[in-house]
Image (cartoon, rainbow, N blue to C red):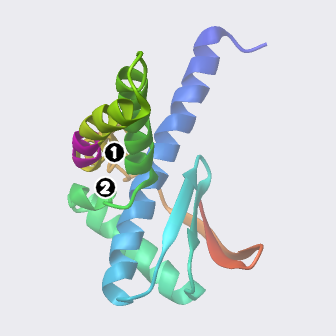
Amino acid sequence: MNSPNDLFTIFADLIRRTRQHHAIEHATIHVLGTRFPGQSFSGHSDPLGFTIYGAIGEGDLRRAVGDALLRLQAGESGLARHPNCGTNLVVTGVLVTLVALLFGGGRRSGAERFATMLLGVLPALVLARPLGYHFQRYTTLADVADRWVAEIQPVKIGQLRAQRVIFE
């Protein structure tokens, strides 16, 4: 049986790889956004790689991933963060929920509770995006020198076209 230290090491490695893949996913979406303006791309990362959703051919995606890796390795760590990351959505949801819990109770009328929550929610919404962008420092890792693409596979998820990028 594995010791607790072995399990911790395995778990830490899974988190590290996911953070690296998340950074490469963001950098890839930055590259794709520049090469294919007006097209929409999104992604999802995990310990094995990431999936890019959107109409993109394997060759174009392979070049974009390669360029993203090279740019991250060359020190363009800003590419690891993206303004449309799901981390921003999570931070927004948490902040708005906290404001609702803090300001939504009491023995006031519905209109008073609504006005109070609105006064709390508006600043929370303004703060959420930069705070989410800041939190991406913990959900991404731009140090990707030990990552290289093993394969890219087309996948279909319902009616969505996607490409699965798997790393060694």
Q: Is residue 139 visible?
A: no
Q: Give the secondary structure at mark 2.
A: loop
Residue depicted at x 31% and y 44%:
132
Q: Nearer the viewer, residue 82 or 123?
A: 123
> Which quarter of the figure has residue 72?
bottom left
Q: Is residue 34 visible?
A: yes
Q: Nearer the viewer, residue 87 or 120?
A: 120
Q: Quadrant of the N terminus?
A: top right
**Magenta extent:** 122-127
Estimate the x, y position of residue 18 in percent, counting from the top left.
51, 45
Query: What is the three-letter code of the residue carrying label 1?
Result: Gln
Residue depicted at x 31% and y 60%:
83
Residue depicted at x 59% and y 46%:
47
**79 relative position to 156: left or right:** left
Estimate the x, y position of residue 110 in percent, counting from the top left.
43, 32
Main SS type for the magenta part?
Answer: helix
Mark 1 → mark 2, Cα distance in angstroms? 6 Å
Q: Which residue is mark 1?
A: 136
Task: Based on the picture, tell me whether residue 90 belongs to the magenta stretch.
Answer: no
**20 relative position to 79: left or right:** right
Residue depicted at x 38% and y 88%:
38
Q: Which residue is mark 2?
A: 81
Question: CB under 8 Å between callouts 1 and 2?
Answer: yes
**63 relative position to 122: left or right:** right
